[in-house]
Amino acid sequence: MAASNFTQDDSPTFILTGIPGLEDAHIWISIPFAAFYMTALLANFTVLSIVAKEQSLHKPMYLLICMLALSDIVTSTSFIPKALGIFWFNLKSITLAGCLTQVFFFLASATVHSGVLMIMAIDRYVAICNPLRYTSILTNARIAKLGLVCVVRAVLFILPEPVLLSRLPFCANRIMPHTYCDTMVVAKLSCGDITGSKMYGLALAFVVTGFDLTVIATSYMLIARAVLQISSKKAHQKALSTCTAHILVILMAYPPGLFYILAHRFSEGITPYVHIILANLTYLMPPMLNPIVYGVKTKELRDKVVAFIGKRCSTDVPDYKTT
């Protein structure tokens, strides 16, 4: 349907085109997207299952890893199934309500993810700089409360975004050159004033992300100062090993996300399909890699994962012994 045939109504339907310019390659593009998504689900659910079953892993650090896994599952599930529906079945239409729901869950889960990374930085600070009081300062109950605060914060900060979008009039063009309902892509289809939505989204990115990054940076500066005061090289290596997984997860989360947000708002020279592929990979790769990083770098969790996989493999192998 041509864009000129759309008329204003109270419940508009949008058309997601997928990746413009690469329509003929949608099937091929869907293969790595689906593989990454299934790997993310499998890895994160495996971590959740192992931590839930193993009493020895019921500790603050592993509760935080579970919170991170849950946020990763919600983030990837909020947009990848729709993208695959476009690639495989040409399911391009989405209602305004569906679009706003996708925007809310996508942004809220990403905000929770950022909050959990901030709490993890505090956890590493206490573990290294105040190890004798670690168990009394960061109890499981306190970690659960901090996780709840992250969720409440995400809801309160993100909810105005879809509300602002819902108040915009959509008059003519409702074709979105994207695989999911990105906030700015939706706003740009409006024939009304989008200044409020644009400024709120930008302020939200800098306020929430800026606060979380400030806490993370402060925690690591205090950790670095404490480690440098210790002369033992073994202690240095142990501290670095303790923080390596968290640092890798931070590097996978913040730089690509901030680059995408800024590029979307200020750069007009990026080829559309490059921008859209980058947008998908920015929020798809961390959910796949985060549980792998923690599974490899955290010895206790790694041992449990190896034991779990070994047990599953041994039960799946048929017994050919005869009596």
Image (cartoon, rainbow, N blue to C red):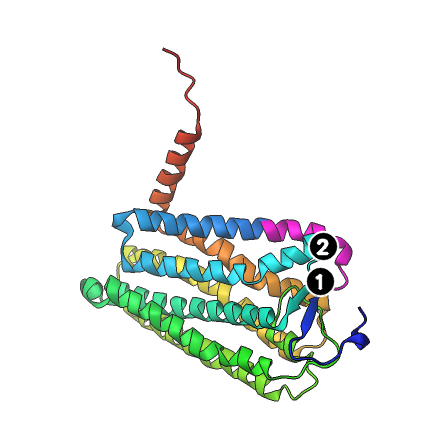
Instruction: List x then y, in percent, for residue 254.
Output: 50, 69
Disc 2 residue type (three-letter): His
Kindly identify which numbered label has been placed on residue 167. none
- Magenta span: predominant SS is helix
Q: Is residue 228 visible?
A: no
Q: Quadrant of residue 266?
A: bottom right
The reply, left or right, for residue 247 in relation to residue 40 is left
Q: Residues within 10 Å of mark 1 (few under 14, many from 20)?
A: many
Q: Residues within 10 Å of mark 2 (few under 14, many from 20)?
A: some
The reply, left or right, for residue 133 in relation to residue 284 is left
Query: Magenta includes 120?
Result: no
User: What residue is disc 1 on?
Assistant: 19
Kindly identify which numbered label has been placed on residue 26. 2
Disc 1 residue type (three-letter): Ile
Q: Secondary structure at mark 2?
A: helix
Which residue occupies 37% across, 40% down?
308
Question: Of label 2 and label 1, which has the lower sequence position?
Answer: 1
Which portion, as a residue range, is magenta? 18-34
The reply, left or right, for residue 199 in relation to residue 240 is right
Which residue occupies 65% across, 67% down?
94
Q: Are marks 2 and 1 in contact (CB under 8 Å)?
A: yes
